Amino acid sequence: MGVFRYENKYAAPTKEQRDRYMRGEREEHSFGPGGQILLIAYDEAVYIKDDIDGVRILFTGVKDKQKAYDEVRRLIEEHQQKDDQDSSFETGNDR
């Protein structure tokens, strides 16, 4: 089906996309620091809300739903690396 990426929280899925994919029962999982990465699994889609960067991603279709879990792992690693770099820079250990 498809992957729809929104670079800010105000450009989230359209009403048509919400009506088509984001309905019915859902399962929510929180990840990352303070649970700021939210994965919401629906029957026909998976929606990721990354409140750290403000990114939103909608994965539709069975094949693309699995990619959502890989994307969450990637986001967690990316944020961890940024945190490690920031803390290294703050302590002066950036050499």
Image (spheres, grey):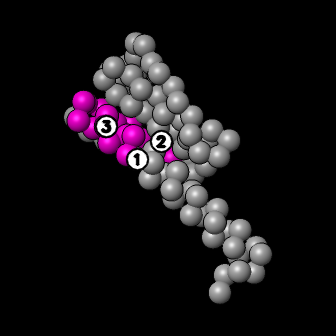
Question: Is 61 inside the magenta-drawn segment?
Answer: yes
Q: Residues within 10 Å of mark 1 (few under 14, many from 20)?
A: few
Give the CA distance from mark 1 to mark 3: 9 Å
Give the CA distance from mark 1 to mark 2: 11 Å
Residue under pointer 2: 56
Question: Which label sits on residue 71?
Answer: 1
- Tell me residue 46's x, y (percent): 39, 31
Query: Would you say the residues marked 3 and 2 are in contact, meaning their CB atoms lie under 8 Å apart?
Result: no
Task: Tell me which amino acid carries mark 2.
Answer: Arg
Q: Is residue 81 above or below residue 21?
A: below
Of the two numbered discs 3 and 2 on the same chain, state the one appearing first in sequence: 2
Q: Secondary structure at mark 1?
A: helix
Q: Nearer the viewer, mark 1 or mark 2?
A: 1
Q: Residues within 10 Å of mark 3 (few under 14, many from 20)?
A: some
User: Which quarter of the picture shows residue 47?
Assistant: top left
At x 51% / y 47%, what residue is drawn? Answer: 55
Q: Is residue 54 above or below residue 13?
A: below
Of the two numbered discs 1 and 3 on the same chain, state the one appearing first in sequence: 3
Query: Would you say the residues marked 1 and 2 are in contact, meaning their CB atoms lie under 8 Å apart?
Result: no
At x 45% / y 45%, what residue is drawn? Answer: 72
Farthest-out residue, right: 91
Q: Quadrant of the N terminus?
A: top left
At x 51% / y 25%, what residue is drawn? Answer: 28
Farthest-out residue, top: 24
User: Does residue 56 appear left or right of residue 52 in this picture?
Assistant: left
Q: Secondary structure at mark 2?
A: strand
Task: Tell me which amino acid carries mark 1.
Answer: Glu
Residues rendered magenta in the picture: 55-70
Question: Which label sits on residue 66?
Answer: 3
Q: Is residue 25 above or below residue 85?
A: above
